[in-house]
Amino acid sequence: MMKVLLKVSETPPIPPEGGIVIVDKEPGWTSHDVVAKARGLLGTKKVGHSGTLDPDATGVLVLGVGRATRLLTFLTGMDKSYVGEVQLGTTTSTLDAAGDVTGTFDMAGTTFAQIETAAAQFRGDIEQIPPMVSALKVGGKRLHELAREGIEVERKARPVTINRLVVEQIDGEPLAFRVFVDCTSGTYIRTLAADIGEALGGGAHLRSLRRTAVGPFGLEQANPLASLEVLPAVEGVRSMGLTEVHEDLEIDVCHGKVLPLDRLGVIGEGPWPIVNTAGRLLAVYQAHRGDTAKPALVLAG
């Protein structure tokens, strides 16, 4: 896999089709802060992220650079993985350690077996009410913006899936526990923490959070902002399966032509990332009318 090592003192070349950057976000940075800093380091305004990560949270944040920002629509919905710590006995205005304490509960008698039983009911398909401090838009305005104005609005519960939820004791802290979560995009771990606390007959908040993976991208691929690596755009969609085309068909793909499925050589429902024989990402095609496919986006050209 080709990587372009980024030193703070230099601006690396960005491939014509753009690239993907996997950041290990530090605490205290908003996702917007990371994007703004990356724009300066990379020397381009064309940088976006595939999904927000709370300011106090750390871990994997996927950026698209150049033309590859258009790939972010396919990356936003990828599953996520987290490790966090939950504190029993107090609830907060933000459901995490950044908020003001809104309630205290005597939960000294809570056993770890009870915590495991409470957590078990949140595995699988569940519904969550988004927190007021989320980036979700209601009436054209983000919830966290309304929350800063002291406005609370009704939020509808949304379906999410918790594919894996493991709880672990923290030595010497009977009123805290660690959670390991694999979930669908749009899951709020702070809400999960609060819901587990409520299920135990008291309250809880999320005191720390680290995102360990976004789709196929884990902490092993992530780097701090001071030492970014630019990955080829194709790495952003490799997990979707790649379809290679030869030179004669490459021209048609680069021109964004609607193509028969059998000529394109694709099967299934798509979308289909299309690469040339050198492995460069040319386009992402999607099903069209009948037995044809059209480009959702073209990166080459």
Image: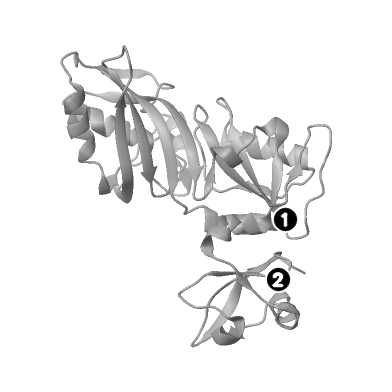
Name the residue rendered at 61%, 74% in the picture: 295
Name the residue rendered at 21%, 31% in the picture: 116
User: Residue 5 lies in what quarter of the image?
Assistant: top right
Q: 251 or 160, which lies in front? A: 251
| Quadrant (top left/top right/bottom left/bottom right) for the C terminus | bottom right
User: Residue 106 lies in what quarter of the image?
Assistant: top left
Name the residue rendered at 47%, 49% in the picture: 140
Write down the residue under mark 1.
Answer: 18
Amino acid type indicated by mark 1: Gly
- Looking at the image, residue 46 sits to the left or right of residue 261; the answer is right
- Looking at the image, residue 151 sits to the left or right of residue 104; the answer is right
Does 252 appear above or below 153? below
Does residue 79 appear in the picture of this structure? yes
Q: 14 or 55, which lies in front? A: 14
Write down the residue under mark 2.
Answer: 276
Asked if labels 1 and 2 touch by Cβ distance under 8 angstroms, the answer is: no
Image coordinates of residue 1 in percent, x first then y, are 68, 52
Image coordinates of residue 125 in percent, x first then y, are 26, 51
